[in-house]
Amino acid sequence: MGEEAGPGRQWRVPPGHVALKCAAAVAVAGLAALSAHDRQLVLLAGVAAIGLAGLAVRDLLTPVRLAADGAGVTVMSGYAGHRRIPWADVEAIRVDERRRLLLHTRLLEIETVDDLHLLSAFDLGADVHDVAEELFRLRAVPDG
C-alpha cells in the first residue's frame, strides 16, 4: 500500500463477512449441482455462485478498503487495487444517509476532483459516522 506518514488507521471488511460470502457461494454452487435436472435453476444458481465467489475473492485479495494517515487516504480502486490520495486532493468527506421504505442506508463519501469513493459499514467494518470523524481528525494532523 505504500509508505504512510505518521500514525494512521485502516478499515477492512470483517472476516465474518468474507466467511459468509464464501459459505454462500459454496451453498449456491451445491444447489446448482443438486438441480442438474432443471437447466434454468442450474444457470441461475451458477451465476449467483460465481458472483458470490467473485465478491469473496475480492475481499480476500484486498480486505483493507480504506486507510488514512496525516498525509492522505488510500482507497480501494477497481476490483482489487488501491489509490493513494493526498489530503490536498480530497474536496469533501461526508456521510450520505437515505431512508427508503424499510431500508436505511449510510455511505461514507470521499470526494476528490475527479472521483467519488463510496464505502459502507460492510466495507469498513465500522460505523461510517465514526470513520468520518476519524478521517477529519487525521486530516487535521499536520505533516511531519
Image: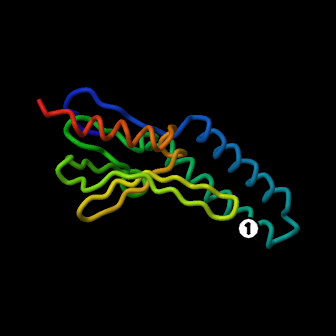
Name the residue nearer the viewer: 78 or 9. 9
Please state, as top left, top right, bottom left or bottom right, where the N terminus lies in the image: top left
Q: Position of residue 116 (x, y in %)?
A: 35, 61
Q: Which residue is mark 1?
A: 44
Q: Residues within 10 Å of mark 1 (few under 14, many from 20)?
A: few
61 in relation to 70, above or below: below
Q: Secondary structure at mark 1?
A: helix
Q: Position of residue 111 (x, y in %)?
A: 31, 58
Q: Quadrant of residue 78?
A: bottom left
Q: Vertical placement of 113 versus 3: above or below?
A: below
Identify the residue shown where x is 65% and y is 58%. Answer: 103
144 over 66 or under it: above or below: above
Q: Position of residue 114 (x, y in %)?
A: 26, 65
Q: Look at the image and tell me in which quarter the C terminus lies.
A: top left
| Colour scheme in use | rainbow
Tell which residue pokes out farthest to the left in this image.
144
Rendered location of residue 33, percent (x, y): 80, 57
Q: Nearer the viewer, residue 59 or 42?
A: 59
Q: Amino acid at mark 1?
A: Leu
Q: Residue at the spot x=61%, y=55% of the render?
A: 104
Name the residue located 42 percent from the left edge and 44 percent from the top edge: 65
Residue extending furthest toward the right: 37
Which residue is found at the position 80% from the left and 68% from the top? 41
- How many discs mark residues in the rendered view? 1
Q: Is residue 83 left or right of residue 48?
A: left
Left or right: 18, with 43 as reference point: left
Q: Is residue 75 above or below residue 71?
A: below
69 sits to left or right of 133: left
Looking at the image, which residue sits at the far bottom? Answer: 40
> Residue 14 lies in what quarter of the image?
top right
